[in-house]
Image (cartoon, grey):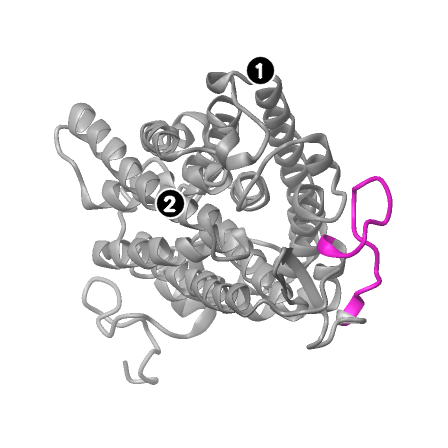
Amino acid sequence: MPSTIDPAATAWLLASTALVLLMTPALAVFYGGMVRSTGVLNMLMMSFVAIPLVTVVWLLLGYTLAFGPDAGGGVIGNLSHIALTGIDPGTVHSVGPHGGIPELLYVTFELTFAILTAALVSGAIADRAKFSAWMVFVPLWTLLVYAPIAHWVWGPHGWLASFGALDFAGGMVVEIASGASALALALVLGPRVGFKLDAMRPHNLPFVLLGAGILWFGWFGFNAGSALQPNGIAAAVFLNTLVAGCLGMLGWLAVERIRDGRPTTFGAASGAVAGLVAITPSCGSVNTLGAVVVGLVAGVACSFAVGWKFKAGYDDSLDVVGVHFIGGIAGTLLIGLLANRVMTGGARGLFYGGGAVQLGKQAVGVLVVALWAFAVSFVLGKIIDRVMGFRITREDEVAGIDFALHAETAYVEGVHGHAPRGLFGPHN
């Protein structure tokens, strides 16, 4: 292990960590614009509260379970770093031949990934989940779902990493895990009142576009930062991230234009996010042409996938399943087709002479992570629902979750031009 700090790598990861942390408030704005006006504050709060909840549990147990020395079989880390035991400002995490970065910085960088992943799940249960139940779910989910998957894929001797499944920045760990968990919770809570009957359109499309833009900005730290040092791979990943977001947007808009006759601002934001989701696992495996394909496939596939909920009957409020789950699967599997040895240093996809071996490994990773995340999240959601109830009452949902749970509304006018009863005192 190196004993010296690489200043360039440390500076790069400090900036990247800040960018990834910014993604959670950006997600809050993105999600907040997508819900109805009576639920925007609750949606913002579900993302923001993930920051302290995940931080506390990560420092106590999450980091050592995800990135501590393997406890055996590549399944989970041991407890050697419980409450960051053995980690101090002088502890170095190796990142390359020039030295390493402070281990505390690596702890923080990975923490920001865990925070964002937990917050992503909330979009599937918008407008109907108890805030108290969400606060119980998040830390337990971080330990039972996120930490084990992170160890399998990124941890020391993690079994999926040893098996050869590739995930550069979180297609399995972040996107598939959050998407499968979101589907599980959507099934546990059931559909919103008026699902399939009411339009439930986004109440603030400028919020949606603003949130998507800030997410895109933060995604450069998310993906390129995962190189852990400022080098050629980080530069290639940075470009791949930009390219895939662009092609995702264009692919989604093309589908809207052909299918619906008009491209929409909502489609532009969703398409960009779909492309970014799909390039997350593959950004360190494909070249620029591969990024074009990944982004375009994701934009087209996800634009169709968001409509599946109406046919299948599950209410994924903000399309976490359609965008993050399907986009994550697409990007992870496309590694098996488009992986380039120049980027991976060894593994090649089917289209680059590697045969179907890598595709098979990617498929195993997708299946295992999806099943684990769905099963554990479903059981955890059911237990919380049985013990304390996970869903608000029908009356509160119809009246508006913001005022029912937080005694606030985002807009003075309230609903239909009137403030909710009691907002400004007994005479209103």
The secondary structure that dominates the magenta segment is loop
| Residue at 42% in and 75% down | 407
Let me know if residue 133 is in the magenta part.
no
Q: Could you tell me if residue 400 is visible in this image?
A: no
Which numbered tag is attached to residue 356? 1
Q: Secondary structure at mark 2?
A: helix
Q: Is residue 240 left or right of residue 314?
A: left
| Residue at 32% in and 58% down | 211
Let me know if residue 69 is in the magenta part.
yes
Number of labels in the image equals 2
Range of residues picked out in magenta: 66-83
Amino acid on which the number 1 mark rests in the picture: Ala
Q: Within 10 angstroms of label 1, few (less than 14), some, or many (20 or more) residues?
A: some
Which residue matches tag 2?
A: 241
The CA span between labels 1 and 2 is 25 Å
Q: Is residue 285 left or right of residue 383?
A: left
* Observer-nearest of 411 and 46: 46
- Residue 373, x across and y down, in percent: 64, 40
Mark 1 vs 2, N-terminal side: 2
| Residue at 47% in and 57% down | 230
Amino acid on which the number 2 mark rests in the picture: Thr
Q: Residue pushed farthest front? A: 98
The C terminus is located in which quarter?
A: bottom left
- Residue 301, x across and y down, in percent: 36, 27
Q: Could you tell me if residue 202 is visible in this image?
A: yes
